[in-house]
Image (spheres, helix red, strand yellow):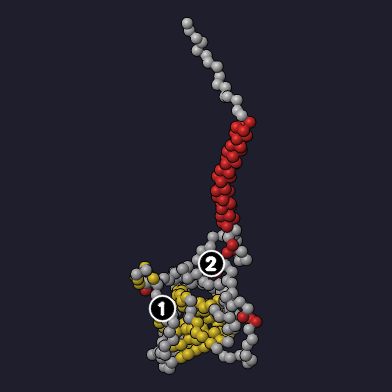
Amino acid sequence: MFFSSSSRPYRPLSLTPQEVIDSENDDDHKAKLHKTSRAVLHWPLVVVILCTFINLLLVSTPAFLQGSSVSPDELITRKNVHLLRRPSQYIRFDEIERTSPPILREFTNFPMSVSLVDHSAPSHVFNDYLAMRTTRTGTISPDDRKVHVTQTVSTIFQFRAIDWGMEICELHVALPPVDRSTTLELYRLNATVPVDISTLSFNVRPPRVAKLGNIMPGKDSLDWHRKLSCAMDDVLVFELACSEDEPSGSCDIRWWQSHEKTAPGQYFITLHEIR
């Protein structure tokens, strides 16, 4: 005799009231654990989204560009870094009581760059490859810079007034005795921001705005000087050239401008800031 292969569906035994309560509590506990695990899994995603939003915000409007003349979408390079706002490091110095009359103080400010231009080769950009040297950290340019003045070549010096309250600058040109007298001319150039020396040539140099005077080295040592007004962070640019009245080939002066020395008998050009 064969029995039907179909079987009755499984029916759990009846639960007691206490077992029903325990089962409901267990289901509630599992539901809470499931909600907690879902929340734990969601928090890292929220943090990632928040960090991504902050990064996009920083990229679109960098904080260091706020308050400057650089647009947010403009890339900062060595050529336009001067456009960034220069915050003052002399906070509330104007509130300090000072002696009257003020005590005379001064220090020597060396040029931040020295560059050559040649009007016989107006597009030529001078470089200091021949003066470079190799060190443990790589190839570097020397601190001392070449100064050369001839009938066609002139030298451009750049200074920045760097101290607070030093409102008067005095430009010095010191020259030792020379065998043949000659006449040099010193000009103030129309520049209020640093000139890019990597592209500086006679064609793109700032125009001359004023002649400061003639400098005439001769048989005696010379220390030519001229006072100028200068506020903190002002950029002052000068050009030293031979006089146009000098006979051809009679003007040829050169030296290595020291970065930090003003030894007697040495050629140098410096800016003294005076209070």
Which numbered marker is on residue 72?
none
Decide which of 143, 42 is in the foreground and name it: 42
Which numbered marker is on residue 144?
1
Residue at 44% over, 86% down: 262
Residue at 51% over, 10% down: 4
**Neighbourhood count class around disc 1 (C-alpha, 10 Å): few under 14, some 14–19, many 20 upward:** some
- Expressed as whole percent of the image width and height from the top left, the position of residue 255 reads 40, 82
- Expressed as whole percent of the image width and height from the top left, the position of residue 165 reads 60, 83
Badge 2 element: helix
Q: Is residue 39 visible?
A: yes
The three-letter code of the residue at mark 2 reads Val
**Neighbourhood count class around disc 2 (C-alpha, 10 Å): few under 14, some 14–19, many 20 upward:** few
Disc 2 to disc 1, C-alpha distance: 24 Å
| Tag 2 residue | 81
The three-letter code of the residue at mark 1 reads Asp
Query: Mark 1 or mark 2, which is nearer the start of the sequence?
Result: 2
Decide which of 152, 192 is in the foreground and name it: 192
Residue at 38% over, 90% down: 179
Asked whether, in this view, residue 59 is left or right of residue 141, the answer is right
Badge 1 element: loop
- Expressed as whole percent of the image width and height from the top left, the position of residue 182 reads 44, 87
